[in-house]
Amino acid sequence: MPTPIPTPNPDPNPTRPFILVVCHALTGHLAPLLRITGALHAQLTDSTTIFFLGPTAHRHRIEATGATFLPLLDDADLDDRAYYAHPPHPADQNYSSLHWSDRVLIDLRAQCLDPLPTQWTCFTSALRTLHSRGPSRGVLVLAEAFFYGILPLFHRAPLPPDIPSPIGTLCVSVTIPAIRSVDLPPAGYPFPYDGSPSGRTRNARLWERSWARKASSLTALLDTQLRKAGAPSGVGEIFLSGANYTCHETILQLGVPGFEYPRSDWPRGFHFAGLVQGTPRSQPQSQTPAIHPPFPWWAELIANSSLPPSERKKVVVVAQGTVEINPHDLLIPTMRAFSGPEHLDTVLVVAILGWKDADLATYNFVVPGNSRVADYLNYDAVLAHADVWVHNAGFGAVNHGIANGVPMVVAGEGMDKTDNARRVAWSGIGVDLQCAKPSDEAVKDGIERVLQDEQFTTRVQELRRESEEIDCFGIVQRELLRIMDTRPGIKQRGQS
């Protein structure tokens, strides 16, 4: 049973709306929303109260932002680390042996669609909790795009009679925008960007003939789950066309325009909102508190950065991520690639396992003398000292590289990673190895290519400057305040 929420003190702001944050339970989705929530708490603490409906596995991280935690329950309470340690799979197949495109279909069903009715129940319960705390206060929902449990609200699912509708919703996208465009093929398809007339013809064919067929079971399941939640009708479009975005009045896309393919048909209310990674625009680097991770080799990294450029070792930072966590996929190949005697005094590899208390003890691998291993490490802290950033193409990892101006080598598949990796190459900020498990030689070649070609650094620095011109936290705050002040109400499909 969840821990009861303490009885609050008298409401000091009886006219200001509550903010309710809802988010998909994966770490990669939660992390940006937690940064936004923490910034909002610091900025708005005198005028409103922030609640976060989230998974119990991340309760301590949510509460650390200053938000009040509200628990997801039952099948909606996803523990992503446990999920990938023991993933679902068909009875006659092993999940890990499936092609990444088949695993994505399983993940989308298990993580987004199966728990939708329970998410809706938890969402309405959260609204009831907030209404009981401040009956005269409205609720403004800050929704990460892949929390499907809010969709019934926009498809006429009835709220319990004692719960008023939210006064407004704001969508935050923490992945590449999964919104259908005439200029793009469906996500994951191995075709280059082509917005020409012939490219648009190809894209339409892929959407209507190929993806519609592959996603047919998910399209049907979404409509079924909406009806289970009380909605009288379904979405009426191919799954992953963007219904989870365009139901909201405003869509704030994390990231910078220079990383995203140009489109001729961005939806109404779509805006790039910059990065949550790196130093906030309102907080200059000189005012950022120094981070000193508790590793004995950290001083070595700092000392290397203090040397004249000609005397420094090249620093390669590699992270395994939080989903595909087998270090043999990327960490170990990167360490092996530069373990030869010719590299011991010229290259320093920092390998990040991605989870607290993780280690390499069970992997029968001897760490080379010029490699340093961390279980968990703040990316921004270490990338301040990096020459190359190697990772598996998670959207957050890409944006950490952009925020710190570090060119990258990416090797990832699954979810949006294939599309992120293609954009890394297309935007000129790094090398795409076009696989999730590269050889030692492929990793080495990719890193050496980045180190030898200054165009990668030049381009990623351009995107870094682009990100510094966009005040992400300020944009989110201003949009929330705009909705609070105008109180536009919920705009449901089919209503004017």
Image (tube, rainbow, N blue to C red):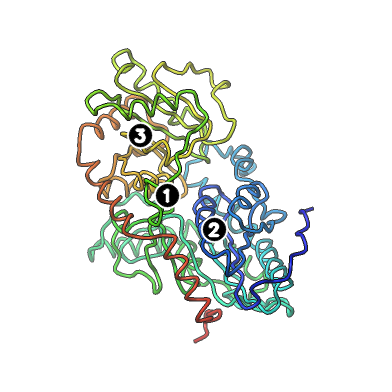
Residue identifier under label 3: 385
- The amino acid type, in three-letter code, at marker 3 is His
Residue at x 52% of width, y 85% of height? 495
Give the residue at mark 1: 277
Q: Is 77 placed above or below 335 here?
A: below
Q: Earlier in the sequence, mark 2 or mark 1?
A: 2
Q: Amino acid at mark 2?
A: Thr
Closer to us: 393 or 18: 18
Q: Are marks 1 and 3 in contact (CB under 8 Å)?
A: no
Q: Is residue 369 above or below residue 79?
A: above
Residue 477 on image: x %, y %? 47, 66
Name the residue rendered at 27%, 46% in the picture: 460
Q: Tag 2, which secondary structure?
A: helix
Real-space Cα distance between discs 1 and 3?
16 Å
Where's residue 121, x and y in %? 70, 65
Q: Residue at x 49, y 68 (%)?
A: 243
Q: Residue furthest front?
A: 287
Marking on residue 339: none
Cα distance between the residues tagged 2 and 1? 14 Å
What is the C-alpha distance between the residues marked 2 and 3?
28 Å
Instruction: Name the kind of residue labelled 1 in the image.
Output: Gln
Count of numbered circles on the image: 3
SS at circle 3: loop
Q: Which residue is outermost to the bottom? A: 496
The residue singled out by tag 2 in the image is 37
The percent position of residue 479, horizontal first and vertical second, equals 46, 71
